[in-house]
Image (spheres, rainbow, N blue to C red):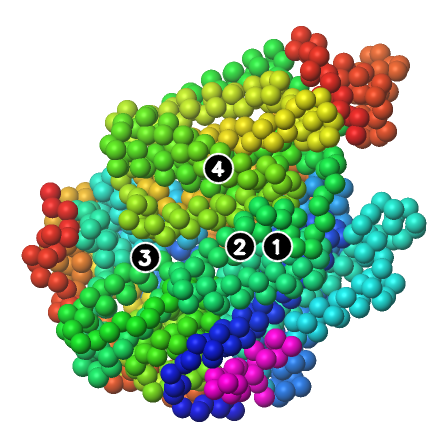
């Protein structure tokens, strides 16, 4: 029975400090449960589990259904536990059926699979539980409040405050006092060694994944008495959980615990002074923490190592003369499309072209530079706003306004990049995400200049580009040179230097490459090209909104690059075309576009474990190798075959492969050296 | 068993949706209109809305259509993103050849569509978007809006709030344009009527992410007599739960935007706070013949009660039909001419699409929240005609671009 003691009297400052502190602790507890699961999964399996929020949401929904069936105190608590167990079992199934197939795929590729799962879960939840918000029962015996220092503290908050440390201690005991826990920690430290000692990694990974999902699901189930169960719960928690994991230090549960408390307390007190701070607070905290301490509270500084995203065994090469001719022919065919296609298809075509720019610019950072940015949409959005300001506030003609976009984006990228290149790996990803969210919140909040979430309207193209075909040609005229420029950058001395910093920080610095400067320049170039895409997008849509730089746009970019194939040069273009065309078509055709898109992504992940272009290149290489074997036979062919199969590749084989796979007319010394390094690893 | 069959039905429905039906050959006399809404982004609102307009289209065609021609609605999802909404609008206009656009829920999507309409010279009738900018600051010739705007709802609530003794007011609103402008208008109107009141505190949690306990305590610390709330959806549930447990609302006047709409009131069930002054839709206590007829038809077709969204969708399509019936031709200029000053009989009573700013005079119900049989309801309700809650024509003219 709730206890209501009548209206509150005037609150003293001490009471306020106490009550906000307690509220912060209670919020921290729920956040910690979810974040700890994410941290454990990442620590062992290195999977950036984007589906963690989906499991959190499923935990809440299943718990809601069970609490509707079971009554009484025992029934309620049993329902919460049972919900978490059921969802953990689903997690097990997912790990065994899907993730096991792709552990050997390039790093971050698993992100794509879990993203597909998230999309599917969102629509499945809608199909199973319906669209309405569901309000579950309050916890039996904990529906009221206790008076402490003259303030009401909800009993359930006290329960959560106690639960946080209990879970923390239980996890510590599990990892330090059980054999399974010791193995998990060993695997976190050195997976290869644990495997070499004869431990079955498969089941270790499955177990860890199940534990992580269990924690997410119980975190969701525990929200029932305070929240409404709704279908956007997943996205509202996942980013914050990532932030907490990163602030705390990857793989550290204690770090996650402290980070959750820090973030929640800062929010509880922050809103007293700045009532609008919640929008951006966690990202501000993360940015500050990562700039000051790049590996979080309890994380360990990463030793300089070759943890490149691109792990290719097939050296890159520029297009040879035949291929260039083909590419030219393709561009020509595309340029002739306006004579064949209707207006709607051309508008879609322009949008797809714009997103190839976006994906290709991200690819320069991710694949060439080995720097996966989770906040690339910021520069796309800055480009759009730059063009919008130029067109509306300064009345510039369209073409000038479009060029103003990349300038603003490059300016933003120069500032963010300056901080971000000090970091690498997931920390780099999260710092870029933090900055992107800060930029987004400025666009969202600074209503006088940006129009807030109502955006800037009336940015329509000049007369010559106002028809769909005119706009398509203009987009093509901007996109082709920009894409060609990116290709040239990749194969320029600068591009080789960038790949060198990716492949080995120490070696590249020892031969005199300034790593930070090189990566910073790449960051600015990538930002500017994304900004060009954004500027074109502004004129395509006629308006600009903060949505253009939202997390979901950044994620779309990642998905495009991964889908195309992270180890390839042309992957992002193919990835962007496939993903954008598919998603536009599905949104137009069905209300359950997320379900189908998620399924399609998962199917592609399984069918093309190296991305579409990566897998196609494998097939082509296999075909070439077979033909070469038929024709010649001998040492060189064996080397090619060995490379193709990803077998043991030594220095000598590398050189041979290089010679075999590269058109000699385009080869130079720098190229050979860089390819050499890729194979060397 | 019922739950299972519900799941099965939904799955079958989904399968039916996924199996893309071949487009039916249209008769020459079909009149096609395009409809866009956040069906996948915001299903809690848009599903009842879709049921509402589908019922209306069925009735309209059963009663002779548009002067004998069949009304065909092509509906698209915008996934809650303005960029996708413009893509969908493009598809509807340039591929499907619709004669007008309707729909949208979010204000920014409505604005994106209204700007698109002005650029492409297409007639656009917005249903739900509430932002005042739509018909005033960013208003244009091609855009009309059905629902009572932010200003109108704030004016209805401020009128009642001014009669209350409360002097110290605090505000809680989601941190985006809708919340900001709702508070701004309410403050302005109430302070004008009651110069003696004080604004003592404000909280702006981000939409969907309210830290309700902290917000409740921060508001309590400012010691207000009255609270204005603009939160809705899951955030409202959290706020109410924390506020109830922590005794925030006891002895205080609460004025709350939209809370009386079934979409937001029903999830609260027995935790519905009592005595909040709010706008909404009390479908259970309306006994006008027009509403009774609608209610009967809706329940017969869907075996469910209508939400406010259902009324918006239903009224939207009848307004569309009225415009098309009155206009001889289907080009944008003729449609605009037909719609300006058009009178339509709705479930809530007669409305007019004003010539001056293209806003309809549809009103809303103002009443108080209460709990009845473990459910949240609105009591002491009265309908406020939107025409009485709009600024003077002179003021409108200064706000709306005149050309």
Q: Which mark sits nearer the N-terminus, 1 or 4? A: 1
Q: Position of residue A69 (x, y in %)?
A: 60, 81
Real-space Cα distance between discs 1 and 4? 21 Å
Q: Earlier in the sequence, mark 2 or mark 4?
A: 2
Task: Answer whether residue A143 is magenta in the image.
Answer: yes
> Is the C-beta separation of discs 2 and 1 under 8 Å?
yes
Q: Quadrant of the rendered structure where residue B348 is?
A: bottom left
Quadrant of the rendered structure where residue A326 is? top right
Residue carrying label 2: A285
Is any part of residue B297 visible from this angle?
no
Indicate left or right for A366 with B81 as reference: right
Real-space CA distance between mark 1 and mark 3, rounded to the nearest whole angstrom: 31 Å
Give the CA distance from mark 2 to mark 4.
Answer: 18 Å
* Callout 2 touching callout 4 (CB < 8 Å): no
Which residues lie in the magenta part?
A: A141-162
Outermost residue to the left: B394
| Mark number displayed over residue B262 | none
- A659 shown above or below B66: above
The disc placed on residue A415 is 4
CA neighbours of label 1 inside 10 A, class few (<14), some (14 to 19), many (20+)? many
Is A325 left, or right, of B209 in this rendering? right
């Amino acid at each position: 029975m709730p206890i209501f003691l009548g209206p509150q009297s005037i609150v003293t400052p001490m009471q306020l400090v106490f009550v906000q502190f307690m509220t912060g602790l209670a919020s921290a507890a729920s956040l910690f449960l979810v974040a700890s699961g994410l941290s454990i999964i990442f620590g062992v399996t290195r999977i950036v589990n984007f589906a963690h929020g989906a499991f959190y949401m499923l935990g809440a929904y299943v718990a809601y259904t069970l609490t509707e069936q079971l009554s009484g105190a025992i029934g309620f608590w049993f329902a919460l536990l049972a919900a978490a167990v059921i969802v953990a079992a689903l997690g097990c199934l997912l790990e065994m059926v899907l993730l096991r197939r792709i552990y050997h795929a390039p790093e971050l590729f698993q992100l794509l699979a879990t993203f597909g799962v998230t999309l599917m879960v969102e629509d499945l939840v809608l199909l199973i539980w319906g669209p309405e918000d569901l309000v579950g029962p309050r916890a039996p015996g904990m529906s009221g409040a206790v008076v402490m220092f003259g303030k009401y503290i909800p009993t359930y908050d006290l329960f959560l405050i106690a639960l946080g440390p209990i879970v923390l201690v239980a996890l510590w005991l599990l990892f330090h006092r059980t054999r399974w826990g010791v193995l998990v920690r060993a695997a976190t430290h050195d997976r290869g060694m644990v495997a070499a000692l004869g431990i079955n990694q498969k089941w270790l990974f499955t177990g860890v994944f199940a534990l992580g999902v269990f924690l997410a699901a119980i975190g969701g189930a525990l929200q029932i008495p305070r929240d409404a169960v709704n279908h956007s719960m997943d996205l509202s928690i996942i980013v914050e959980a990532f932030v907490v994991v990163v602030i705390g230090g990857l793989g550290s549960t204690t770090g996650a615990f402290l980070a959750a408390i820090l973030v929640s307390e800062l929010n509880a007190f922050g809103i007293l002074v700045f009532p609008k701070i919640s929008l951006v607070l966690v990202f501000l905290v993360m940015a500050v923490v990562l700039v000051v301490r790049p590996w979080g509270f309890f994380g360990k500084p990463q030793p300089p190592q070759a943890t490149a995203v691109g792990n290719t065994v097939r050296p890159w090469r520029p297009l040879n003369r035949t291929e260039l001719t083909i590419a030219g022919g393709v561009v020509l065919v595309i340029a002739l499309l306006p004579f064949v296609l209707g207006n709607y298809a051309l508008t879609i075509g322009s949008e797809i072209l714009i997103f190839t720019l976006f994906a290709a610019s991200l690819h320069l950072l991710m694949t060439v530079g080995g720097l996966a940015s989770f906040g690339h949409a910021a520069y796309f959005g800055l480009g759009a706003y730059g063009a919008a300001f130029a067109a509306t506030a300064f009345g510039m003609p369209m073409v000038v306004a479009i060029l103003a976009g990349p300038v603003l984006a490059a300016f933003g990228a120069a500032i963010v990049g300056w901080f971000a290149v000090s970091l690498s790996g997931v920390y780099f990803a999260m710092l870029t995400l933090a900055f992107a969210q800060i930029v987004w919140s400025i666009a969202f909040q600074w209503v006088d200049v940006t129009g807030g979430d109502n955006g800037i309207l009336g940015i329509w193209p000049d007369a010559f580009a106002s028809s769909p075909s005119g706009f398509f040609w203009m987009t093509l005229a901007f996109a082709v040179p920009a894409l060609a420029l990116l290709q040239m950058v990749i194969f320029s001395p600068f591009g080789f230097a960038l790949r060198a910093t990716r492949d080995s920080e120490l070696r590249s610095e020892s031969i005199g490459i300034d790593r930070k400067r090189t990566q910073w320049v790449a960051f600015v170039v990538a930002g500017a090209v994304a900004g060009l895409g954004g500027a074109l997008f502004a004129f395509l849509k006629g308006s600009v909104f903060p949505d253009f730089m939202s997390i979901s746009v950044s994620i779309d970019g990642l998905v495009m690059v991964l889908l195309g194939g992270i180890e390839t040069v042309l992957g992002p273009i193919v990835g962007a075309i496939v993903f954008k065309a598919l998603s536009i078509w599905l949104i137009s055709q069905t209300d359950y576009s997320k379900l189908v898109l998620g399924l399609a992504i998962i199917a592609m992940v399984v069918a093309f474990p190296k991305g579409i272009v990566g897998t196609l290149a494998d097939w082509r290489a296999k075909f070439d190798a077979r033909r070469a074997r038929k024709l010649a036979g001998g040492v060189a062919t064996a080397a090619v075959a060995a490379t193709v199969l990803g077998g043991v590749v030594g220095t000598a084989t590398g050189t041979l492969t290089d010679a075999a796979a590269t058109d000699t007319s385009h080869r130079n010394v720098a190229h050979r050296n860089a390819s050499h390094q890729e194979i060397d690893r | 068993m019922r739950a299972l069959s519900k799941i099965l039905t939904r799955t079958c429905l989904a399968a039916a949706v996924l199996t893309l039906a071949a487009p039916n050959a249209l008769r020459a006399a079909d009149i096609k209109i395009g409809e866009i809404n956040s069906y996948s982004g915001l299903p809690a609102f848009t599903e009842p809305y879709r049921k509402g307009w589908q019922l209306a289209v069925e009735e309209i065609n059963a009663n002779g259509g548009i002067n004998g021609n069949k009304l065909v609605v092509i509906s698209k999802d915008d996934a809650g993103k303005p960029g996708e909404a413009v893509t969908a609008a493009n598809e509807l206009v340039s591929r499907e050849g619709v004669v007008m656009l309707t729909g949208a829920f979010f204000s920014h999507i409505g604005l994106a569509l209204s700007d698109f309409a002005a650029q492409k010279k297409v007639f656009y009738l917005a249903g739900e978007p509430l932002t005042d900018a739509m018909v005033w600051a960013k208003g244009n010739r091609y855009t009309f809006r059905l629902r009572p705007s932010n200003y109108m709802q704030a004016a209805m609530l401020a009128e009642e709030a001014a009669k209350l003794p409360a002097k110290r007011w605090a505000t809680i609103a989601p941190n985006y344009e809708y919340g900001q402008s709702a508070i701004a208008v309410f403050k302005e109107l109430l302070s004008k009527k009651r110069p003696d009141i004080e604004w003592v505190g404000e909280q702006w949690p981000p939409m969907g992410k309210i830290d309700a306990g902290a917000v409740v305590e921060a508001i309590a610390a400012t010691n207000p007599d009255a609270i204005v709330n603009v939160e809705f959806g899951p955030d409202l549930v959290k706020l109410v739960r924390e506020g109830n447990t922590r005794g925030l609302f006891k002895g205080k006047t609460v004025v709350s935007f939209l809370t009386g709409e079934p979409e937001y009131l029903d999830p609260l069930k027995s935790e519905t706070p009592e005595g909040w002054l709010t706008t909404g839709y009390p479908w259970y206590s309306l006994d006008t013949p027009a509403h009774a007829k609608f209610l009967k038809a809706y329940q017969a077709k869907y075996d469910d009660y209508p939400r406010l969204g259902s009324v918006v969708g239903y009224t939207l399509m009848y307004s569309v039909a009225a415009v098309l019936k009155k206009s001889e031709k289907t080009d944008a200029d003729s449609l605009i001419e037909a719609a300006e000053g058009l009178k339509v009989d709705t479930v809530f009573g007669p409305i007019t699409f004003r010539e001056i700013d293209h806003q309809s005079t549809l009103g809303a119900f103002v009443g108080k929240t209460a709990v009845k049989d473990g459910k949240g309801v609105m009591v002491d309700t009265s309908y406020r005609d939107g025409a009485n809650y709009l600024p003077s024509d002179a003021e409108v003219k200064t706000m709306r671009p005149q050309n």
